[in-house]
Image (tube, rainbow, N blue to C red):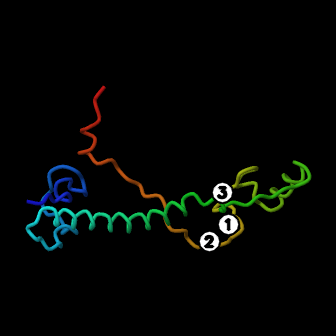
Amino acid sequence: MSINFDRMLNIRGFGPEKKQVKKTVCDTLKRTGNDEADSKQELNAFQELAKASLAKETKSMTDMFDTEHWVCLSFQSREQKDEFLAKSGLIAAGDKYLDGHKVAKIMDIQLTPAPKIIKENKPNKRWLEFIPKL
């Protein structure tokens, strides 16, 4: 008997499976009846999924930590900086660190939307059961 890790861990949420579960990679594997061979197939399938996921995550992390998304202006004095901000109308966006979207709006520039990088995740309630109550 081979262990179906995908079902055992229920990767989509840990714990008992819910009503209808989509087919997983393990469900598509041809079983040989040899536990060692079947387990090797499952582990190889997980390794391929992990590699594909890593490639996607690498791109996401690169985008997330890209530091080339800012610009700096320098003047000879604080008065020049304040004069520039007042005359350009950018003072409405701040006097030191300006939000690029606010500046673009003030200057009537349409920016191409950037892809959303950070996903908002809510904790899985079943995982919260493992956190000790104080």
Q: Position of residue 23 (x, y in %)?
A: 18, 69
The residue singled out by tag 2 in the image is 111
Earlier residue among tags 3 and 2: 3
Q: Which mark is residue 99?
A: 3
Disc 3 marks a residue whose amino acid type is Asp
Residue 122's mark? none
What distance separates the C-alpha of mark 1 from that of mark 2? 7 Å
Position of residue 84 measured from the top left corner of the image (x, y, whole percent) = 84, 58
- Image height of 44 relative to 91, above or below: below
Viewer-proximal residue among 51 and 99: 51
Q: Position of residue 35 (x, y in %)?
A: 12, 62
Q: Does label 1 or label 2 sit earlier along the sequence?
A: 1
Q: Nearer the viewer, residue 26 or 71?
A: 26
Query: In the rendered view of the protein, which quadrant contains the N terminus?
Result: bottom left
SS state under label 3: loop
Q: Circle 1 sits on which residue?
A: 104
Which type of secondary structure does the marked residue at label 1 adopt?
Answer: helix
